[in-house]
Amino acid sequence: MDEDIGEIEMLTDFDDALLGCVYSEDGTPVACYSSEVVMKRLAEEGYEETEALDYVEEMTTGMKLVSIHPIEFEPEF
Protein backbone atom coordinates (compact mmCIF):
# COMPACT_ATOMS: atom_id res chain seq x y z
CA MET A 1 0.00 0.00 0.00
CA ASP A 2 1.38 3.36 -0.95
CA GLU A 3 -1.20 5.50 0.81
CA ASP A 4 -0.81 6.70 4.39
CA ILE A 5 -2.93 4.42 6.60
CA GLY A 6 -2.83 6.65 9.64
CA GLU A 7 -2.06 5.79 13.21
CA ILE A 8 -3.28 2.58 14.84
CA GLU A 9 -4.59 2.83 18.40
CA MET A 10 -2.72 0.23 20.46
CA LEU A 11 -3.06 -1.18 23.96
CA THR A 12 -0.08 -0.30 26.12
CA ASP A 13 1.98 -3.30 27.28
CA PHE A 14 -0.07 -5.93 25.39
CA ASP A 15 2.08 -6.39 22.28
CA ASP A 16 2.12 -10.16 22.84
CA ALA A 17 -1.68 -10.20 22.50
CA LEU A 18 -1.71 -8.29 19.20
CA LEU A 19 -2.86 -10.55 16.34
CA GLY A 20 -2.90 -8.01 13.52
CA CYS A 21 -5.31 -5.43 12.20
CA VAL A 22 -8.40 -5.06 10.07
CA TYR A 23 -9.61 -1.96 8.27
CA SER A 24 -12.87 -0.16 8.94
CA GLU A 25 -15.04 0.96 6.03
CA ASP A 26 -13.30 4.33 5.93
CA GLY A 27 -9.87 2.65 5.74
CA THR A 28 -8.88 3.29 9.34
CA PRO A 29 -6.73 0.43 10.69
CA VAL A 30 -8.18 -1.27 13.78
CA ALA A 31 -5.94 -3.38 16.03
CA CYS A 32 -7.07 -6.97 16.78
CA TYR A 33 -6.11 -8.54 20.11
CA SER A 34 -6.42 -12.02 21.59
CA SER A 35 -8.84 -11.70 24.49
CA GLU A 36 -7.46 -14.98 25.84
CA VAL A 37 -3.89 -13.62 26.06
CA VAL A 38 -5.06 -10.35 27.64
CA MET A 39 -7.21 -12.11 30.26
CA LYS A 40 -4.51 -14.70 31.08
CA ARG A 41 -1.95 -11.94 31.60
CA LEU A 42 -4.26 -9.98 33.88
CA ALA A 43 -5.05 -13.15 35.86
CA GLU A 44 -1.30 -13.72 36.31
CA GLU A 45 -1.07 -10.16 37.65
CA GLY A 46 -3.70 -11.03 40.27
CA TYR A 47 -6.88 -9.69 38.69
CA GLU A 48 -10.13 -11.58 39.26
CA GLU A 49 -12.17 -12.04 36.07
CA THR A 50 -14.60 -9.20 36.85
CA GLU A 51 -11.74 -6.86 37.77
CA ALA A 52 -9.90 -7.78 34.57
CA LEU A 53 -12.97 -7.07 32.44
CA ASP A 54 -13.44 -3.72 34.17
CA TYR A 55 -9.76 -2.89 33.63
CA VAL A 56 -9.94 -3.75 29.92
CA GLU A 57 -13.10 -1.67 29.52
CA GLU A 58 -11.47 1.28 31.28
CA MET A 59 -8.24 1.18 29.26
CA THR A 60 -10.07 0.82 25.92
CA THR A 61 -12.74 3.49 26.41
CA GLY A 62 -12.93 5.54 23.23
CA MET A 63 -10.64 3.18 21.30
CA LYS A 64 -11.51 1.28 18.17
CA LEU A 65 -10.29 -2.30 18.51
CA VAL A 66 -11.34 -5.87 17.95
CA SER A 67 -11.05 -8.64 20.54
CA ILE A 68 -10.68 -12.11 19.09
CA HIS A 69 -12.18 -14.80 21.31
CA PRO A 70 -11.18 -18.46 21.11
CA ILE A 71 -13.94 -20.87 20.15
CA GLU A 72 -14.06 -24.61 20.37
CA PHE A 73 -15.78 -26.54 17.66
CA GLU A 74 -15.10 -29.46 15.40
CA PRO A 75 -15.66 -28.67 11.74
CA GLU A 76 -17.55 -31.17 9.66
CA PHE A 77 -16.21 -31.76 6.18
Image (cartoon, rainbow, N blue to C red):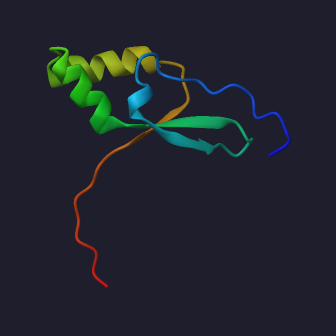
Apparent side of residue 58 relative to residue 20 in the rendered image (left or right): left
Observer-nearest of 51 and 47: 47
Apparent side of residue 48 relative to residue 60 in the rendered image (left or right): left
Residue 42 rendering spot, x and y as whole percentages: 24, 21
Q: How many marks?
A: 0
Asked if 44 appears above or below 75 in the picture, the reply is above
Outermost residue, right side: 2
Query: Which image quadrant is residue 74 in?
Result: bottom left
Query: Which residue is drawn at the image coordinates 25% and 24% (left, top)?
Result: 41
Query: Which residue is drawn at the image coordinates 17% and 22% (left, top)?
Result: 43
Apparent side of residue 7 relative to residue 65 in the rendered image (left or right): right
Residue 72 rendering spot, x and y as whole percentages: 22, 59
Q: Quadrant of the C terminus?
A: bottom left
Residue 75 rendering spot, x and y as whole percentages: 28, 75
Outermost residue, front side: 16
Query: Which image quadrant is residue 2 in?
Result: top right
Query: Which residue is drawn at the image coordinates 63% and 27% (left, top)?
Result: 8
Apparent side of residue 44 relative to residue 28 in the rendered image (left or right): left
Query: Which image quadrant is residue 50 in?
Result: top left
Residue 14 rendering spot, x and y as whole percentages: 40, 23
Query: Which residue is drawn at the image coordinates 15% and 14% (left, top)?
Result: 46
